[in-house]
Image (cartoon, rainbow, N blue to C red):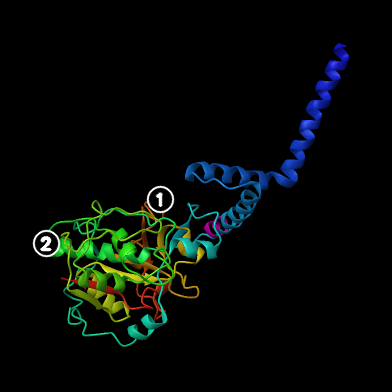
Amino acid sequence: MAAALIFKRVFFVAMLMTLACQVMSSGFQEAEIALKHEEWMVRHGRTYRDQTEKEMRLEVFKQNLELIEKFNKEGNRSYKLGINRFSDLTQQEFVALHTGYKKMPEDIQLSSTSLVTFRYEKVSLEEIPRSLDWRRRGAVTPVKNQGSCGSCWAFSAAAALEGLVKLRYGYLVSLSEEQLKDCIPYGDGLCSGNLPSKAFEYIAKNGGISSFNNYPYYPRQGYCTWAPSVPGTQIRGYEIVPPNEMSMLKAVAMQPLSITLSAGSPAFRFYSSGILDEDCYIEEIDHAVTLVGYGTSEDGIDYWLVKNSWGEAWGERGYVRIKRNSADPRGTCGVTAESPTFPFA
């Protein structure tokens, strides 16, 4: 009896060792990725409808993880990539859910003829600081999160206006992206995208914009509850910056700007730290952000300081540094491919 029991135990141990060897020789990497995916799901509170969807998301997660690790192992780069909450999405899904800069045909026609006199054209480059961070001057609110809604344009416009309010009136107030999203009819729906210039037009014509506290944000379709009789921050209009880096530098030295870029590439989506210095322009400009400064790294790379709307867990606590003075006339990631804008009071 004892001999039989010993035999069963030896057989069981041998079987486990055989299975372990098989896993180590052929499936250890897959098991490790599956474990990373499980840990990622817990960290980001992600659940799936069924096992089929989970397996599909695991495969997407695996491809993104391998891309990130391969990039970081190459070394000698000025920036790093990292796993984040977008890691189980395809590029197409990511762009559809987390960007939101969208032009209609009539907007394209108007933008080509609407450039007026640039008020900062005569600003001397010798008079502006060598580096600037509007956060240190109290003109930038904490990083926000647009969620799964194409409302980046509203966050970009609100942040630019928050900076103007601080510079003009001396106080910093968080403004309502939700009001902009709910109250400006455009395209196929309130989360389907828009332009920062549309936000500035609306604010100027409709009695202002509420504070974030009075009209908080929800990343879903909503209904406009703004009443013109309710006091709000007002502007007279907005201006367009000529689409080149020199003009953009002059303008941001005066106030934060609403700018646009191409965000669909892995380089931008999985950006973790450093200075993004390669062309991440994919097919079109699809994302609006806020330019809040500029500087030069210790390695001598000139950069733009950009506030995003994907939460503080993305990038450098919600920010990205993008190479300035690019050889590409569109700028790195297309930052000058479309004209930046700023509000005026």
Residue at the image position 57 percent from the left and 57 percent from the top: 64
Name the N-terminal-most of marks 1 and 2.
2
Residue 69 among those drawn in magenta: yes
Any part of residue 295 in sight: no
Residue at the image position 17 percent from the left and 82 percent from the top: 122
Looking at the image, which is closer to me, 15 or 214? 214
Q: Amino acid at mark 1?
A: Ala
> In the picture, which quadrant includes the C terminus?
bottom left
Residue 161 left/right relative to 181: left
Which residue was labeled with disc 1? 313
Looking at the image, which is closer to me, 252 or 290? 290
- Which region of the structure is painted magenta? 68-73
* SS under mark 2: helix
Q: Which mark is residue 75?
A: none
Image quadrant of residue 134?
bottom left
* SS under mark 1: loop
Which residue was labeled with disc 2? 169
Residue 211 coordinates in the image, percent (x, y)? 22, 56
Give neighbour class at mark 1: few <14, some 14-19, many 20+ (Cα, 10 Å). some
Looking at the image, residue 263 lies above or below residue 9: below
Give neighbour class at mark 2: few <14, some 14-19, many 20+ (Cα, 10 Å). few
Main SS type for the magenta part?
helix
Residue at the image position 50 percent from the left and 52 percent from the top: 83
Residue at the image position 18 percent from the left and 78 percent from the top: 124
